[in-house]
Amino acid sequence: MLAGVCGGFADYFDLDPTLVRIGYVLICLISAGFPGLLVYGILAIVMPDS
């Protein structure tokens, strides 16, 4: 919800944004948070605005 990364992925793949966000949080928790936050930050910069 911060930069719209998960919502953008959900829209692109025609998925429910809530499920994508929950999946992202689970992946962050499993990977100790840092890699997921780093990827989110990079994608927030790289992904085009819609």
Image (cartoon, helix red, strand yellow):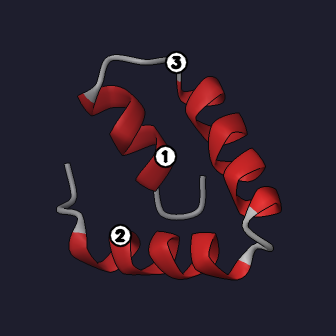
Q: Earlier in the sequence, mark 1 or mark 3?
A: 1
Local SS, label 1: helix
User: What is the C-alpha distance between the residues marked 1 and 3?
Assistant: 10 Å
What residue type is disc 2 on?
Leu
Which residue lies under the disc numbered 2?
43
Q: Give the class, few, some or many, for how many residues have Cα within 10 Å of label 2's Cα (few <14, many ≥20).
A: some
User: Do callouts 3 and 2 mark residues in contact (Cβ within 8 Å)?
Assistant: no
User: x, y (%) of residue 24?
Assistant: 63, 48
What residue type is disc 3 on?
Asp
In this picture, residue 39 sits left or right of residue 47: right
User: What is the C-alpha distance between the residues marked 2 and 1?
Assistant: 10 Å
User: x, y (%) of residue 29?
Assistant: 82, 60
State which quadrant residue 28 falls in.
bottom right
User: What is the C-alpha distance between the residues marked 3 and 2?
Assistant: 19 Å
Q: Earlier in the sequence, mark 3 or mark 2?
A: 3
Which residue lies under the disc numbered 3?
16
Q: Is residue 14 above or below residue 44?
A: above
Q: Give the class, few, some or many, for how many residues have Cα within 10 Å of label 1's Cα (few <14, many ≥20).
A: many
Q: Is residue 14 above or below residue 39?
A: above
Local SS, label 3: loop
Local SS, label 2: helix
Q: Which mark is residue 41?
A: none
Q: Earlier in the sequence, mark 2 or mark 1?
A: 1
Residue drawn 19% across and 48% down? 50
Which residue lies under the disc numbered 1?
6
In this picture, residue 42 sits left or right of residue 12: right
Residue drawn 35% across and 70% down? 43
Nearest to the observer: residue 46 or residue 2: 46
Q: Is residue 41 above or below residue 22?
A: below
Residue drawn 64% across and 27% down? 18
